[in-house]
């Protein structure tokens, strides 16, 4: 394996040692430290993200007060971007309020300019100022002290906060285009409108681009952690596509699916989607292969896999070739097919730039691909706190003329992308049969606006001996 970190080699060695010793239970693996260590790291990220990104975003999008109300189990999609790692859901009702107190004076945006208030719930590790009820709890009650805000009292508290600050614009999370910015439920909107009254409700503005950008924005510290996640994914795909896991003529694609799920679980990690494995075979159609074929020598293998750690997600597609007897490498035609997919990736990295919409990128990239004789499609998406993340889509597999609405958003610095695409190439060794090389690799758009792979992209087929 081409993995440089010692800790990763040690992690991958643990299952082999356990098997050699006849252990019936796998040793717990913690490639990214304990949950407590991860939480401490995430809390630092949270504080820095809100200090670094939020002030400028509020000013850029003309919102001096942003209100985000939500109820338990019906959380706004921005929830995971603004709460502590120990918080799994809203508390009864939680109303998060952000106020730019420097906007009126025109002072440059800064962390100290933005007040962060939680009406309900906790301070999220000191990130918010939490306001409690004025109602005293009965003597001897669990928790003691002041009661939690409840019902209309919360809306009254919000009205007081707003009246004290007298904002010009009140941003709300409502959108007909982006799910990430449509988190305000109709019930919460009705309750808030009734409590605040017509004068304040007239100042409501669909924030839309503000939460979209906040969710998408990533820190350099997160990038460093993400590189470790990517290294683990690479090691796992190479292990999965090897003779340690695959026995040609015996192993089914479903065996690899559940191998991945189990390995992820054994390492204390999660995944945001069910992995998939596909086979292409000389002279055989996908329909005749069926849904769960047995892997044979000479097959081309494809995986679509991901992991989740510290609320971050990966999305990767890699390719492999199962060697025929006497072969030491894949046929030249298959290697050329992968090179064509690499060519598509090169164009994607060239065309993705801050300020461009997803539809603009798709159009220019496909024009360049056609000019170079590449037969491919692109369907890339942002990634980060969500697998299919906040930001502009660059095509969908079935929308290669652009994606209205969701493709019209712009790329911003400090966001991540999953470069997902495919190139189809006739392979001479397969009698001219078209072979599809689908690739997906995660990239980082730096704060400098320059794209780079999170670690690298696949330019050689993995070989199963």
Image: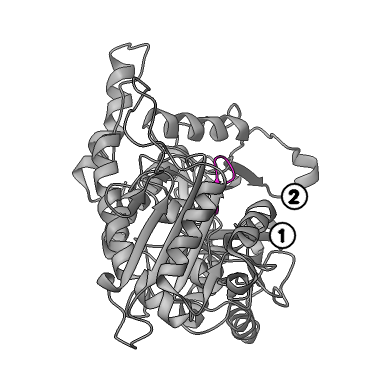
Judge by depth and name the residue closer to the eye, 150 or 364: 150
Residue found 57% across the figure and 81% down from its top = 357
Mark 2 packing: few (<14 Cα in 10 Å), some, or many (20+)?
A: few
- SS majority, magenta: loop
Q: Is residue 158 magenta?
A: no
Residue 189 falls in image quadrant: bottom right
Q: Nearer the viewer, residue 405 or 335?
A: 405
Q: What's the residue at 54%, 34% (across, down)?
A: 256
Asked whether 191 or 389 is in front, the reply is 191
Task: Please give the range of residues in magenta.
Answer: 71-77
Q: Is residue 439 left or right of residue 41?
A: right
Crowd class of label 1 (few under 14; some 14 to 19; many from 20; radius 10 Å): few
Quarter holding residue 459: bottom left
Q: Earlier in the sequence, mark 2 or mark 1?
A: 2
The residue that label 2 is drawn on is 283
The reply to whether the magenta stretch includes residue 75 is yes
Please, which colouring scheme is shown?
one colour
Q: Is residue 144 above or below residue 166?
A: above
Question: Whole-percent x and y of residue 321?
Answer: 53, 48
Residue 164: assigned label: none
Total numbered badges shown on the rendered structure: 2
Q: CA distance from mark 2 to mark 1?
A: 8 Å
Q: Are marks 2 and 1 in contact (CB under 8 Å)?
A: yes
Residue 35 versus residue 141 in the image, above or below: below
Q: For mark 1, what is the residue?
A: 431
Query: Which residue is the extreme one toward the right?
Result: 287
Q: Is residue 397 visible?
A: yes
Point out residue 8 in the picture as x, y percentages from the top left corner: 26, 41
């Amino acid at each position: 394996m081409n993995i440089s970190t010692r800790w990763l080699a040690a992690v991958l060695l643990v299952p082999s040692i356990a098997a050699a010793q006849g252990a019936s239970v796998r040793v717990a693996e913690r490639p990214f430290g304990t949950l407590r260590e991860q939480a401490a790291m995430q809390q630092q990220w949270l504080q820095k993200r809100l200090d670094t990104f939020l002030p400028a975003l509020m000013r850029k999008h003309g919102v001096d007060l942003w209100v985000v109300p939500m109820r338990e189990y019906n959380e706004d999609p921005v929830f995971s971007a603004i709460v502590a790692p120990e918080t799994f859901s809203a508390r009864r009702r939680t109303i998060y309020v952000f106020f730019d107190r420097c906007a009126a004076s025109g002072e440059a945006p800064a962390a100290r300019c933005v007040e962060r208030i939680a009406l309900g719930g906790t301070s999220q590790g000191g990130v918010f100022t939490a306001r409690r009820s004025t109602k005293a709890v009965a003597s001897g009650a669990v928790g003691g002290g002041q009661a939690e805000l409840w019902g209309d009292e919360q809306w009254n508290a919000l009205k007081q906060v707003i009246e004290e600050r007298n904002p010009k614009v009140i941003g709300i999370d409502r959108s007909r285009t982006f799910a990430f910015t449509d988190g305000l439920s109709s019930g919460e909107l009705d309750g808030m409108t009734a409590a605040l009254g017509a004068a304040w409700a007239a100042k409501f503005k669909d924030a839309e681009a503000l939460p979209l950008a906040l969710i998408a924005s990533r820190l350099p510290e997160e990038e460093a952690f993400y590189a470790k996640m990517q290294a683990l994914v690479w090691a796992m795909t190479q292990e999965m596509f090897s003779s340690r896991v695959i026995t040609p003529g015996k192993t089914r694609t479903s065996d690899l699916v559940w191998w991945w799920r189990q390995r992820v679980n054994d390492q204390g990690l999660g995944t945001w989607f069910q992995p998939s494995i596909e086979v292409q075979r000389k002279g055989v159609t996908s329909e005749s292969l069926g849904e769960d074929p047995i892997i044979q020598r000479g097959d081309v293998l494809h995986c679509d896999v991901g992991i989740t750690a510290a609320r971050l997600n990966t999305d990767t597609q890699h390719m492999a070739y199962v060697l025929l007897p006497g072969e030491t490498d894949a046929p030249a035609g298959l290697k050329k097919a992968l090179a064509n997919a690499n060519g598509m990736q090169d164009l994607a990295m060239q065309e993705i730039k801050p300020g461009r919409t997803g539809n603009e990128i798709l159009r220019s990239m496909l024009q360049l691909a056609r000019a170079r004789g590449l037969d491919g499609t692109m369907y890339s998406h942002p990634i980060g706190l969500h697998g299919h993340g906040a930001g502009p889509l660059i095509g969908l597999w079935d929308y290669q003329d652009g994606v209205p609405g969701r493709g019209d958003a712009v790329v911003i610095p400090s966001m991540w992308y999953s470069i997902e695409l495919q190139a189809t190439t006739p392979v001479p060794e397969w009698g001219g049969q078209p072979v599809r090389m689908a690739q997906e690799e995660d990239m980082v758009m730096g704060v400098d606006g320059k794209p780079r792979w999170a670690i690298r992209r696949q330019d050689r087929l993995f070989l199963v001996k």
